[in-house]
Amino acid sequence: MRKTKIALFLCWLVCACMLSTGVVLAQNSQDMTRSMWLPPLDISKDGYRSDSLFMIVTYMTGVLFIIMTGIMVVASIKFRASSGAKAHYDRGDTKKDGMKGLIISTVIFLAVDGTLLYRSHEDLQGYTDREGNKRAGVWNFPEATKDEPHADVLRVEVLAQQWAWNFRYAGADKLFNTPDDIVTLNDFRVPENKKVLVQLRSKDVIHSFFLANCRMKRDANPGETTRMWFETKPGTAGEYKVTCAEMCGYAHYLMSAQFHVLTDAQWTKWEAEATKWSEIAYDATKPDQQWGWEWTPKRM
Amino acid sequence: MNAATISPSMNTLPRRAVDARIGMMIFLASWGMVFLTLFFSFSIYRFQAPVWPPVDGPGLGTGAFVAAVVNTSLVLISGMLLFLASRSIGKATQPRIVTYVGGTILLGIAFLGIQINTWIDLWESGVRLQSGIYPALFYALTIFHALHVFAGIVTFLFVLPSVRALSSVAALASNRDAVTDQTRFAMAAMFWHFVAVAWFATFFIVYII
Amino acid sequence: MEPLIVDDHIHPEPTSFLAKYVFSHDHKTIGKQFIFTGLFGLLVGGVMAMIIRWTLAYPGEPFPVLGNLLFSDTNGILSNDRYAMFFTMHGTIMIFFAITPILIGGFGNFTIPLLIGARDMAFPILNMLSFWAYFIAVVLLGLSFFVPGGASAGGWVAYPPLASAQFQPGWGHTLWLLSIYFVGTSSIMGAINYITTVIRFRAPGMGWFDMPLTIWGLWLTAILNALFIPVLTGGAILMLLDRLFHTNFYAPATHGVKGGDPILWQHLFWIFGHPEVYILILPAWGIVSDLLSFFARKPAFGYRFTAISMVAITILSAVVYGHHMFTTGMTPMLSESFMTLTMIISIPAEIFFLNWLHTIWHGSIRFTSAMWFALGVVFVFGLGGLTGLYLAAIGTDLYLHDTYFVVGHFHLTMAAAVLFGSFAALYFWFPKMFGRMMNETLGKLHFWTSIIPLTVLFCLMLTVGYSGMHRRIASVEAYPYLKVLQPMNVWITISALALGAAQVLFVINFFYSLFSGPKAPKNPWDVGTLEWSLESPPPYYNFKEIPPVHYGPHEFNNPNSKSKDWIGQWEKDVK
């Protein structure tokens, strides 16, 4: 018995040493451009909703988990047979016991899951943000796009393929798949503080358009169009990444695009330049250049 | 063993016979899910398509439809024959059960013959597995079903000795394994009825909607 | 239906080697066959996991020892295409060839007849066929590694078009589909047996609510198996046609190809896939519910409510699959319905968590290895279950979907909880299976050396996922914002290797005890379920006379029993 205890203690000690080494190791990592315990910088106007919902869930489930583990630990110490604890004969199958369990569970359900359901519903369908502005909700396309074709909305068509992202901007005529489109490869540029509506398709397999900095993703499926929208905060101009979140073949890990958020001045400059270059590069005889589609406003 | 102890009522059947029936029911419920999955897939394609059959592939034509109607009636008749067969066990006044089961097997073979003929006709007229979603679904569903008809026929051939041992009151009276024999027949019959129901659903899904 | 007394004759035990050990009809032997196959699968899948982790933590460095053996053509380094193949096969092997055979095939077969007082399964020959169909599946999957192009590499979910002949040419994925087909057939055969046996072969006097909760878990699992494995089979048939006969069921309507619908596979897969999650975890829940009561020497608190909660979860599991597809472009209406249904599962789940805690409270807990592992399940499943909330809520799932957060979550629930459930069951039933005791000290050491790296491993996976690292990537080199996470990835890998190393303790304990452990008494744990009334190991036909059942499975410290603190279900007059 004594031997067992010593062995267990040693085992604990080894594990604890390993654990603390790990934490120290993690803290001393070089290249600390951001904390590894937090998500990447949030640049979207709705992204904070995801983060705060995450924290809400963490607090609520954290409390539940601590209570659960606490009960287990206390029970394991207090009710050891080796300390002479006597078991109570309690089958717990009376109606009262059942009701008690059901009520506790329902209360937890209403408090935790209820909050989540309500918050998620708001996130999707519309809510009032911290400054009191009405936001449309990330899946509420009719609300988000009701001012279309408003100048403040940028529309982009995205074609995913193994293993690259093609982007298409409508250009001056606001029509897609015309010679004046701006077409880029692995270079996604949007102006800051502006609604961006994206329609997604895929050339081959299923991909997923993931903007970690906007807390948003949407699958790009072959043969059908999906869509998503986001809006960056002012003052977030910089360089980020578009990633593919869905397994799309053995080079899946390389499939990414530059995601540039530009200031208004930068945007105007780039748009003019890119239009020029795209017009030069346009070749009506090349069918794989004409991959754009007519904008389909009604589809999800 | 007399006829009363082997009547199909579950409550009076010996234990192993009930076990077998329950096992068979679970198997059929489970296997029915494969059919349901295929029907579900078919319905998804069907209701996503703006026109049906899809314009980009060939349709099946009236010949196939007539053949399917004939097949449906064959399935219906064979099911009735089987029902009569199970009713006739242990009754002196009824024709021999072997006749009924033989009829069912023949109808099953005729069903397969008509199916194969339909496939050959369609295949030769250019309706291939690869020629579109509707033909592909047609072949997938009907061939998958026909394999079950084939399995049903093989099962009946396999249990024919048991069926013969149940064929008359005299045979039954001298049969010491009447319960086993009747269970075997009942299993085969359950499977056949399942395949029949699957055909009705296939017919409805492929030709009607 | 009142259970009847079995009128079977007791056949003599077969004597030839083939009939006794290979093509055995005996549920105990078949159970052991499944367990050994499953442990082998666990070893293969586990080694694969470590190689995968190694590649992520130390890119470009050969895997020690095994690396040069397996990948001599790439200097011992796991190349990117093999990386895809490895994580695909890791998932497939762990789910279908490790957990399924150990818990469902192995313990299902071993425990069901013994715990309900039957001589064998309802259909012993079908039971044998179930193992051999399963064995064919193992062979087919093993074969797929050696065909040109290698094994399937599109993720274990095999989403088309990536899984189509165009993007995965060769026989690898076709063999994968055939293998899944045989696993399915085996599971259906097993399920028919389990359901029928539990309905019909309970000992006289054993009502539905006198069954041990293990049996409840396995029975509900069998029902889910019977109903939802066929959905995968149906979907796999269409995919097989796509691959072999060039139909277009899952091919999209692009490039002028007459199109089908690639998303349909996702629906079919997850209609099967979500019940599958519960197929894997329900037996573990049942076993844990029993073991907590057995070793806390207290009746399972709210036994009836636990059983009813399990039934409720079984039913709910069939209607929540859409939460795997929130990002596919499903309508918001449908998505929100799936979110709500998913969250409703937390009510029954909370009920039996409460019952588990209530069972050990005021108990007199005996800390055996089996009990430690059972407590371990409560702990890791608590973690895994609660992290499920983040993924059920669409608001957070849109960010967390397909990141390592998902990986951490389902490893905590499906891998860790189920693995610990299997270990608890092994430590508990080992004496009954093999007639020898396992070493308790090594067992406890195994528990502590497992749970600590395991918790660190999967919790850090949650953290890297939250920090934005997405799944199934062979390296983070393309992503500047993920390079920060490299120390964490290294630490996950170290934990994974430590977890793997800890299993050596189990292997030593298992084989040492198998051959030279102390002889097990009839009832080493003082437990009252029916199998403990038998010799260890039980005779060929289990029960000479089927014992009539007078008590529930968890009668501990019953005030009526003065002589000992437990009552056997078979005992009549207790003093």
Image: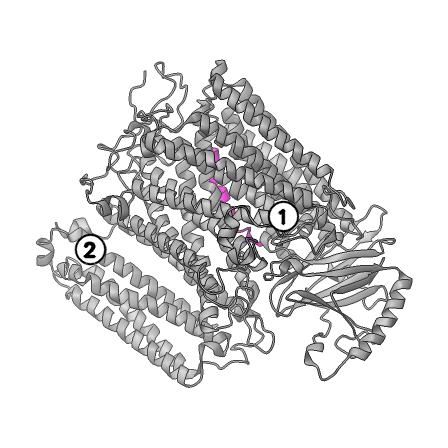
Is residue C313 shown above or below B147? above
State whether residue B198 appears in this view: yes
How are the residues colored? one colour
In which quadrant of the rendered view does residue C39 lie? Answer: top left
Q: Is residue A90 left or right of residue A121?
A: left
Q: CA distance from mark 1 to mark 2?
A: 67 Å
Subunit under mark 2:
B
Residue drawn at (12%, 49%), measured in percent from left and top?
Answer: B1
Disc 1 and disc 2 on one polypeptide chain: no
Give the residues drawn in magenta, as a range: C305-322
Q: Camera-side residue: C9 or A258?
A: A258
In percent of width and height, residue A217 lies at 69, 56
Q: Camera-side residue: C251 or A151?
A: C251
In percent of width and height, residue B58 lies at 49, 82
Q: Quadrant of the C terminus of chain A?
A: bottom right
Q: Camera-side residue: A41 or A228?
A: A41
Residue drawn at (41%, 82%), measured in percent from left and top?
Answer: B122
Residue drawn at (29%, 20%), measured in percent from left and top?
Answer: C573
State whether residue B37 appears in this view: no
Subunit under mark 1:
C
Is residue C58 shown above or below C381? below
Q: Camera-side residue: C228 or A66?
A: A66
Residue B182's label in the rendered image is: 2
Mark 1 sits on what residue? C58
Q: What amino acid type is highlighted by mark number 1? A: Tyr
Q: What amino acid type is highlighted by mark number 2? A: Gln
